Image (cartoon, rainbow, N blue to C red):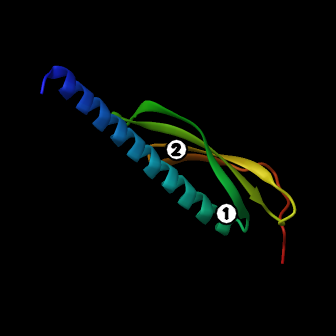
Amino acid sequence: MNLFDVLLLVILCAGAAFFWRIRIISECANQYLQRYCEQQRLQLVSVARKSTRPMLYRGKLDWRSEFLFEFSSTGDDCYQGTLELNGLTIVKTYTPPHRIVTH
């Protein structure tokens, strides 16, 4: 095993670790949005990651992620909100003005 093989192995392991971390962040965002929509009496339609980029957060290298999500308040309409995370920390959830259904 030469230096090139070791370097290649390190790069592959780092890539797998980055992929794994992004997957965990995406699952955290999805779970949070499901709870958020339940609390706000909204129906979560879809979630998509808009961007992910590396950043330093509290002295640690992690990912800053932005997610777009669609939700409905009546079942007939659809609105688009955003969710921002630093690592697994929720930074901001934005929902545009939407119709509130009272029962």
Q: Mark 2 sits on what residue?
A: 85
Name the residue located 67 percent from the left edge and 63 percent from the top edge: 37
Q: Is residue 97 above or below residue 8?
A: below
Question: The C terminus is located in which quarter?
Answer: bottom right
Secondary element at image label 1: helix
Outermost residue toward the bottom? 103
Q: Position of residue 64 (x, y in %)?
A: 49, 37
Q: Is residue 8 above or below residue 93?
A: above
Who is closer to the viewer here, 15 or 35?
A: 15
Name the residue located 64 percent from the left edge and 52 percent from the top edge: 47
Who is closer to the viewer here, 97 or 23?
A: 23
Residue 96 vs residue 91: left or right? Answer: right
- Of marks 2 and 1, which one's residue comes earlier in the chain? 1
Q: Is residue 81 above or below residue 12?
A: below
Q: Quadrant of residue 43?
A: bottom right
Q: Position of residue 72 (x, y in %)?
A: 78, 60
Task: Give amino acid for label 1.
Answer: Cys
Name the residue located 54 percent from the left edge and 53 percent from the top edge: 29
